[in-house]
Amino acid sequence: MGSLSGSMFIALGALSNNQEALDVTSNNIANQNTAGYSRQVVNFSESATVQLGSLQFGTGSQIDNIQSVRDQVLDFRINTETQTQSALDAYLGPAQQIQNNFNEASGTGLQSAISGFFNSFSQLSTDPTSVPLRQSVLTAGQNLANSFNSASNSLHALQQSTDQQIPTIAEQVNTLAQSVAQLNTQISQSQSSGQNSGTLEDQRNALIQKMSQLIDVSQIQGSDGSIGLSTALGAALVVGGEQFNLQVATNPSTGQNEILSSTGKDLTSSITGGQLGGLLRVRDQEIPSLTGKLDTLASGIANAVNTTQAAGTDLNGARGQNFFTVPAVTAGTSQSISVNLTDPSQIAASLNGSTGDNANALALAQLQNQNISGGDTPLNFYSNTVAQLGSDIQQATAQSNTQDAVVQQLQTQRDSVSGVSLDEEAANLVQFQRAYQAAARIVNVVDSLTQTAINLGVGGT
Amino acid sequence: MSVRFNPNLYDNILSGLNNNNRDTAIAQEELSTGRRVNEPSDDPGATAVAIGIHGQTSQIDQFTSSISSVSGLLQTADSTLSSVVTSITQAITLGVQAGDGTLSASDRTALSTQIQGVSAQVLTLANTTYQGSYIFAGNNSAQPAYVADPASASGVTYQGNTGVNQVEIAPGQNIATNIPGSQIFSNSSSDVFAALNNLAQAAQSGTGIQDAVTQLRSVFDRIGAQRTFYGTQLNQLSSTSSALSSNKIQLASQENTAIGIDLTQATIDVQNALTNRSAILAAGGKIQNTSLLDFLSSSG
């Protein structure tokens, strides 16, 4: 047989439990628009029963825990895909700028300088002694050299500005890693004392997602609730409550920034994810490859023109001097190429020595159809180079669009698990409210019963 | 419990709108530039084709410009030779007159002087310049082709060389732009100056006039034959020039195929993007206007 105070006790428990459940509902609604928030649910369970004689009586309900509803695997995957997405976006920004230098569709790129240069020889061949025509050859040569210089310089400037962003990003990674390490400590403490660590985990996940936008991050779930983080080559960033700093050093031969692990291992060439991965791809792959091709092109043209010049005679009857000044090695040619000739008369248009002979001018003009640049004609070599650049960017753009969709989809999946639904919360609200009202009603009934019990034996009221 | 759906539909709406904005921007850029390919990454293959076409087009422009320069030179040479032919015809007429046995010595001297005048005229014509270059001096064109030289049998010396200049007028097609004067005027078997000299002397002396006239006639034939060279070259220039123009039109149409827009398609793309946008916005406006809360509060 139960007791009135037992019922009262059960009702009081129900009141406070439902109030707590209402708190959680209220918190869910409040955080409906909080990024990274995982909805929380209250897990009720029956309290232990009491044996009275042969009967078992329930003693109400208790709240086991307040649980953040999350799918750890989804969180991990979102972070992984975010790394790829950020790397592509960080690559595409500067790559688009590079592309603007080679905007050949509108006919303003290097092609017109190359064609213009060789065509000026062709024009000279129609009147090899003409000083104005010779002057236009020199001008076209200068224009070509300037086009190479400015293309190379703008690539170089872009490389530097990319490089300058690297230390800041490494610093951000370190700051984030420090916060994650602190949260790890707090989370394992609160988990070991049985408290709800959902909010802390939400924060930690938001930080890891931010870090995933910056660099490669691998996550390992620890048994104490902590998450270990490592980056390229398995270099540790966070282990439990401990954080390991990435270091930035200057490469003595290139003067560019390198990323080192806390133990001094060079990670630069292994970082492919996040903003850092994208920027490094631009700095260490796209720009050097493009500069190398411009060098091959410039050096091919310059050397062939110089050789042909040397075979001819200029207007003064002298053997043709070098048309272009170029370095002895191919590397750096596009940056430093310049016109060596100072006077229009120095163009060696003649082959047989007569000033009116145009055979060498014709030979110079026809160099444009010969395989003088990297085994191809200058224009073919150049158009292949631009096509290669275009297809790199096209591919990255397509990947980026796909990656956006993947992340978006995962985010949707995550939200379908962890997002706050107002319908659901409204239903919970009503449910808990009614339960609270019912419990309050029980208190009311027990009160009146107690009143009746107290008045037992007092004369008829 | 049933499968839970993502309660935050606005994220999807937003990314839909973002994609739609991107599509609209691309379609509008295509319409405004008239090009489907505006950056190498839009279509790398087509960009490479376009670069090749631009290169070919600018070469064709160059060939056209070369043709107009060269045809000026060839026309000058042609009309000069036509004058030379006229002069020689005149000299032949004078020679035939001098052959008339009834003429007095003084009449023949007068004719001889006229023939010498023709010779001087031909010398001037042989030293014709075009833009400062002597056009019959081979490619040693800075000096007059012929100078008077009393020591020489013909009375002149050829200062030019046998150089022939070639100019490229179409891809891989070169055309010779001159014939050395030595080949036209002072060939070993046919020398116009020697022939005129002989005729002048024969007219003066009254002997061998017939032979001298015959010699001059053969020179006349030779120069006439040489003149056809210039005519042939000019014909070739004009036919090449029209071939180049049609070539250029072809290239322009190839370029348009490679990187130009299909106007109908582009217009439809813009229209689709805009319609799509309205649809997304309409859907976005309707979503989540209501939740369970609305019904709970209205039912009290």
Image (cartoon, coloured by chain):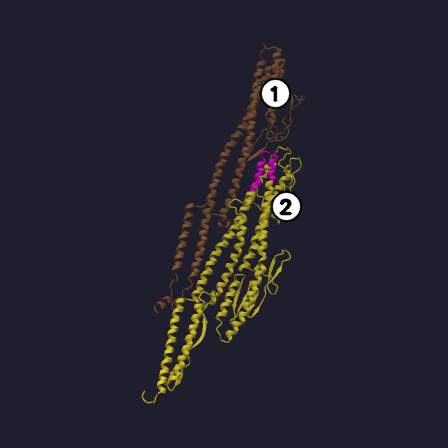
Q: What percent of the width, then of the height, locates residue A4? A: 38, 84
Vertical relation: A178 (above or below) A148: below
Q: Residues within 10 Å of mark 1 (few under 14, many from 20)?
A: many
In this rendered view, identify the residue nearer to me: A34 or B226: A34
Secondary structure, magenta segment, majority class: helix
Instruction: Determine if residue A119 is in view.
Output: yes
Q: Which residue is denoted by mark 2 in the rendering? A: A326
Chain A hue?
A: yellow
Is disc 1 placed on a helix, strand or loop?
A: helix
Residue B184 in the image: state x and y as whole percent: 59, 25
Q: For the residue marked with disc 1, what is the amino acid?
A: Ser
Q: Label 1 lies in what chain?
A: B
Distance in Å between CA atoms under marks 1 and 2: 56 Å
Identify the image quadrant of residue B168.
top right
Q: Quadrant of the N terminus of chain B?
A: bottom left
Palette colour of chain B: brown
Quarter of the image that includes the C terminus of chain B: bottom left
Subunit of label 2: A
* Horizontal and vertical percent position of residue B298: 35, 67
Magenta stretch bounds: A114-138
Residue sticking out furthest to the right: B151
Front one among B267 and A219: B267
Instruction: Report the side of A238 relative to B286 (left or right).
Output: right
Q: Is residue B211 above or below residue A358?
A: above
Residue B248 appears at what percent x and percent y?
A: 49, 38
Q: Is residue A137 magenta?
A: yes
Residue at the outermost left position: A460
Q: Dot 2 lies on which element?
A: loop
